[in-house]
Amino acid sequence: MTKQYRITLLPGDGIGPEIMAVAVNVLEAVGQQFGLTFELTEALIGGAAIDATGGPLPDETLATCKASDAVLLAAIGGYKWDSLPNDIRPERGLLGLRAGLELFANLRPAQILPQLIDASSLKREVVDGVDIMVVRELTGGIYFGQPKGIFATESGEKRGVNTMVYSESEIDRIGRVAFETAQKRNKRLCSVDKANVLEVSQLWRDRMIQLSADYPDVELTHMYVDNAAMQLVRNPKQFDTIVTGNLFGDILSDAAAMLTGSIGMLPSASLGASGPGVFEPVHGSAPDIAGQDKANPLAQVLSAAMMLRYGLNEPEASDRIEQAVLKVLDQGYRTGDIWSEGCTAVGCKAMGDALLKALAA
Ligand code: IPM
Ligand code: MG
């Protein structure tokens, strides 16, 4: 019996289409092995959508995503659209997708692979064994809070305004995802805030403490965000699961990603209470190397694996992809971002071919 899944593909901009092509080949190969058929529908987002339709998230794209079982996204943005006004920039498309699908929970794992330890800019002994999950709130906080905008004051001077706001229910729902995530890991949860300065963070901290009563097996600690940034590069192994708001999570997840050597390796999952999730690499669209067959497709491929695990509940197929990624690294294949002495330098396509061989073996 074959199972059928409807997947929306959003290749987006820059290196997006190249890395998506690799992930699709991998998905189809694994699908054949596990009796899964993927009905793939491609839709426009970001700069590609702006060029074709004038806006970064056409209604049709959101409708297609809503009607699917999961969404696989590559990357959006590029120099070409950098000077557009804020409300029609490519980034708006991504934020609109997150809001439109109510994807309030963003899981960003940062795990160092032994094969890539020397690609990290930090010392081996600092990063060896790092395995962190950042749980970032994704549809609230200062990214979406009202009021927001650039307003003229009476004196004629302009004021830019954003508002960092969290309600109890928003904190509780991300908190519960984080506690449950920690339960499946090493049962340590560090909540990151700025409660020494911000009221919104005080409420955040109070709610996390309240919630912890329901998860007695999880050890809850708190850290201010500035200290967390420092601790991530000083002693990252102290962290297991981190939960934090939208803006702090944006920043800390990039720092956590870089511990592993390359942001080109890291996938993410964005999940709502129900409905399709969005699975995408943590990295951006890398316009400087787009179209040159230099991109590392592994974060995209690992995002497809996360999609199978968290979005479609197909853990065996997910495991199979992750094993193939480890295998090609063991075989010494490296794209430029993770290359080190003695390894075989490959481009995006050749990395894809190596993955297909590893899957077939
Ligand atoms: C991310 C990105 C986005 C964000 C941008 C592209 C809107 O940096 O997914 O981390 O800030 O959330
Ligand atoms: Mg970011």
Image: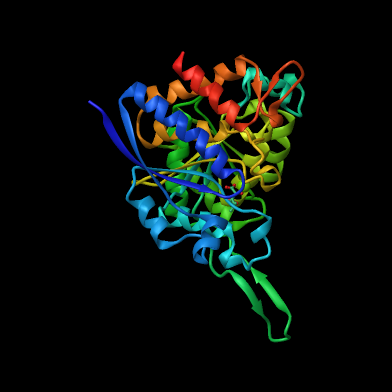
Residue sitting at x 73%, y 86%? 155
Residue 110 visible (yes or no): no
Residue sitting at x 64%, y 17%? 114
Image coordinates of residue 356 in percent, x first then y, are 49, 23
Q: Which image quarter: residue 200?
A: bottom right
Task: Please tell me which residue lies in front, 301 or 247.
Answer: 301
| Location of residue 234 with respect to 153 vertically, above or below | above
Residue sitting at x 68%, y 38%? 255
Image coordinates of residue 152 in percent, x first then y, are 67, 81
| Location of residue 82 with respect to 149 vertically, above or below | above
Q: Which image quarter: residue 354?
A: top right
Task: Please tell me which residue lies in front, 178 or 107.
Answer: 107
Image coordinates of residue 177 in percent, x first then y, are 44, 40
Image coordinates of residue 305 in percent, x first then y, are 46, 30
| Location of residue 150 with respect to 231 vertically, above or below | below
Quarter of the rendering occupied by the N terminus:
top left
